Image (spheres, rainbow, N blue to C red):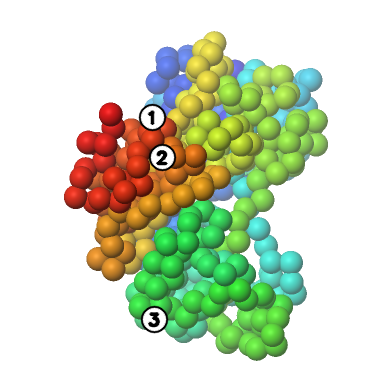
Amino acid sequence: SYDVVIVGAGHGGAQAALQLRTQKFEGSVAVIGEEPEVPYERPPLSKEYFSGDKTFDRILIRPATFWADRNIDMLLNRKVTAVDPTAHLLTLEDGSTVTYGKLIWATGGAPRKLVCSGHDLKGVHGVRTRADADRMMDELATTERVVVIGGGYIGLEAAAVLSKFGKHVTVLEALDRVLARVAAEPLSRFYEAEHRAHGVDVRLGVTVDCIEEKDGKATGVRLADGSVLPADMVIVGIGIIPAVEPLIAAGAEGGNGVAVDELCRTSLPDIWAIGDCALHKNDFADGITMRLESVQNANDQATTAVKAILGGTEPYHAVPWFWSNQYDLRLQTVGLSTGYDQTVLRGDPATRAFTLVYLRQGKVIALDCVNVVKDYVQGKALVVAGAEIAPEKLADASVPLKEMLA
Ligand code: FAD
């Protein structure tokens, strides 16, 4: 029995545990996590960890001893399968039970799988956990050809690392441009061209029919037009399914995620939810209800939930930010481009340093900054203010953004 139980030992769960102690909470705290590792950073799994530039020790959120030192029980290798909100009782996969005073649900999600035949063959990988990355890394020596399914950030980052390793990489995207879900066309075209310039075969508007196999191992990807792309490895980056089934089964509102209010409370008593699995109304998305998959959101919602548990009433209102590293390109985004009706380019993509500004009804709502740290840092204030700045002015890269705020 614990005063606070956190389910999920990832970014949000770690931050919630940390915040409880930072806020001087002295009650008992447990974090229950399905993975065997103490909390680690997930972004490097498709970047510095995958490329071998960082060892696993260097991506731990805190050193392994940190948690016990702060009297936080890490119950790892354990999965919560059922929640009884009336009894305040969790049931674990091994049949054991844990009772809680307050519960923070921070379970993230599992990679969405292809629905076609061959989706679970050896050589087919999702990218979500250290174990996923290790499995891919183990196979690299015997891999020449890789097909990446999905032209989102994770797929493109993996493609960049693999092409640096000299692999023959093909990226398949069902829509007519990469990053279509998260960015406007100029950014998509820029990354498409970069990948092609690095030898990646980017194919747009293609549909996967199935994964072909020999002796239980993937050998290629068959497209809807009947053609087959040979592959030793297939990486599937087509989004996640939020891990909320036990909560929904317990009666929580939601579906694609668990619904939370501005204090990260679910509809069930004494249960909060944060991070990738939390369906929330985001102030920076024009009040749209969404799940936001970012470290920023997991960390900031953790803080909101912990403060609320300790009696606070401060609603979640953190500025979204995100990053992606591909080749020598550092993309940093601030704000959310949801519902944009205009974009403005600052600088020339051909120089490989530029910013794409998103506007909605004349107001700056987001910026995608490629190798322009200054615009990222200064752009935040424009997003916070919802600044109305003439497009011609924004486009003038010789004028710093901070000088545009009246
Ligand atoms: P997670 O960090 O996924 O943690 C959830 C944990 O809960 C997992 O360990 C899971 O095993 C566990 N769990 C699930 N169900 C149960 C259960 N029933 N019982 C017990 N434990 C359970 N974000 C950025 O901002 N920038 C980036 O550059 C970036 N790159 C990324 C690259 C990759 C390859 C991936 C996978 C993600 C990336 N993200 C990035 C997204 C970011 O990692 C997530 O938004 C963040 O991890 C969300 O934190 P979370 O706590 O909600 O979930």
Q: Earlier in the sequence, mark 1 or mark 3?
A: 3
Disc 1 target residue: 385
Q: Label 3 neighbourhood size at 10 Å, few (<14), some (14-19), many (20+)?
A: some
Res 64 visible: no
Tell me the kind of residue under disc 1.
Ala
Q: Label 1 neighbourhood size at 10 Å, few (<14), some (14-19), many (20+)?
A: few
160 up-or-down from 374: above or below: below
Q: Earlier in the sequence, mark 2 or mark 1?
A: 2
At 43% from the left and 52% from the top, the residue drawn is: 343
Seen from the viewer's position, the closer of residues 113 and 205 is 205
Seen from the viewer's position, the closer of residues 289 and 265 is 289
Tell me the kind of residue under disc 2.
Val
Tell me the kind of residue under disc 3.
Gly
Give the left or right position of residue 1, taking residue 88 as reference. left
Disc 3 target residue: 199
Place of residue 247 in the rendered image (x, y in percent of width and height, measured from the top left): 73, 34
**Could you give the CA–CA distance between mark 1 and mark 3, rounded to whole angstroms?**
41 Å
Disc 2 target residue: 364
134 up-or-down from 101: above or below: below
Q: Label 2 neighbourhood size at 10 Å, few (<14), some (14-19), many (20+)?
A: many
At 36% from the left and 58% from the top, the residue drawn is: 325
**Could you give the CA–CA distance between mark 2 and mark 1, rounded to whole angstroms?**
8 Å
